[in-house]
Amino acid sequence: MPLTVAVLLLVGGAAFAVFGPWLLRRAAPALVRIPRLAIGLIVGGMLVWIGSVLAIGPVLAWAGSGPVVLSGQAADVCQRCLAAANPFLDSTTSSLVPTILFLVIPAVVALTLGVATSARMLRNARKARVTAEAVRSGSVRTRLHGHEVSVIDSETVLALTFALRDGGIVLSSGAIRSLDHDELAAVLEHEHAHLRQHHHLISSLVDGIAAYLRWVPLVAAVAEAIPHYLEIAADNHARQAVGTPALVGALLKMAKPSPDTSLDSHPAALHAAGPERIRQLVRPGGGLSGAVPLIAIAAYLLALGIVSIAIQLPYASAAITGCV
């Protein structure tokens, strides 16, 4: 039984890693109608997939009884904890691989990925602070439509948002002059949504993981898709708060890209500009388009998550109870 579960996890994980991007593309018409849920599903799905891959080792630890590489009391504790966590004691077989490796290797991989991702997020945060200070240099702090804003002196029609700790919303004087009352309100609601919905944290997390796992097609697809869904989620909030015409008018006026390409490419700066989103605002999709792939993704991830939790729970329970 444990070997069957391990094989199913391996095959299922490999299949989703390869075909997951195709499913995401097919589900896009449905996902864009629920952008905040889409973000949770896509990012959560990536994390569930990583967790399921790491769960293969603990399942294999249940399946085999390999050579003992520890000695004395350490070996006794290890064997007692493994026995307490193993619901398939009658299904174990002899193995040439030490059982402890099936537990240590996933733990080391998880720890390494977690540390590396956290380190990259911290580096990005430091870069974001430097970028924000440079952009906001000489800016004037003011309040527009109920939002605290840093206004920079530039004719470029520019609106972007840094994390709140780095100054939040930044507008150019050119944007204030070019946008009418409702358009400016729509832009500010869009930027405020980035802050309120913690988009900078989500973007940084995905970027941190993708930096080391982009060779996996699923992770690469998630890293590519998430920025679009973050903007669509912010658009959705602005549209509900101010109205579609005002948001579309603002996007049209802000269609010209910023001459500062460092801002366009920096993950810390989330932009209101994006004419490619206008069609979704003006003619949103309807019906059941994309519903079947979306249901398939949700069902698969639910099953994968349940199996992964079912694998980890016995180990957690054994640790809590002292392996008795």
Image (spheres, rainbow, N blue to C red):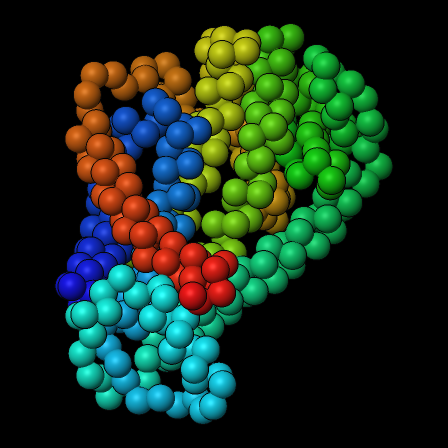
Give the x, y percent position of residue 179: 62, 15
**Residue at (30%, 65%) from the top-left corner?**
86
User: In terms of depth relative to the viewer, which is nearer, 181 or 304?
Assistant: 304
- Quarter location, residue 302: top left
Give the x, y percent position of residue 35: 40, 28
- 244 displayed left or right of 8: right
Give the x, y percent position of residue 209: 47, 57
Vertical placement of 23 versus 63: above or below?
Answer: above
Vertical placement of 64 versus 320: above or below?
Answer: below
**Residue at (54%, 11%) from the top-left corner?**
241
- 43 displayed left or right of 55: right
Vertical placement of 216 versus 223: above or below?
Answer: below
User: In terms of depth relative to the viewer, which is nearer, 292 or 207?
Assistant: 292
- 220 displayed left or right of 298: right
**Residue at (24%, 33%) from the top-left corner?**
294
Residue closest to the far front: 324
Q: How many marks?
A: 0
Evaluate whether residue 29 shows in this view.
yes
- Quarter location, residue 59: bottom left
In the picture, which quadrant includes the N terminus?
bottom left
**Residue at (37%, 37%) from the top-left corner?**
41
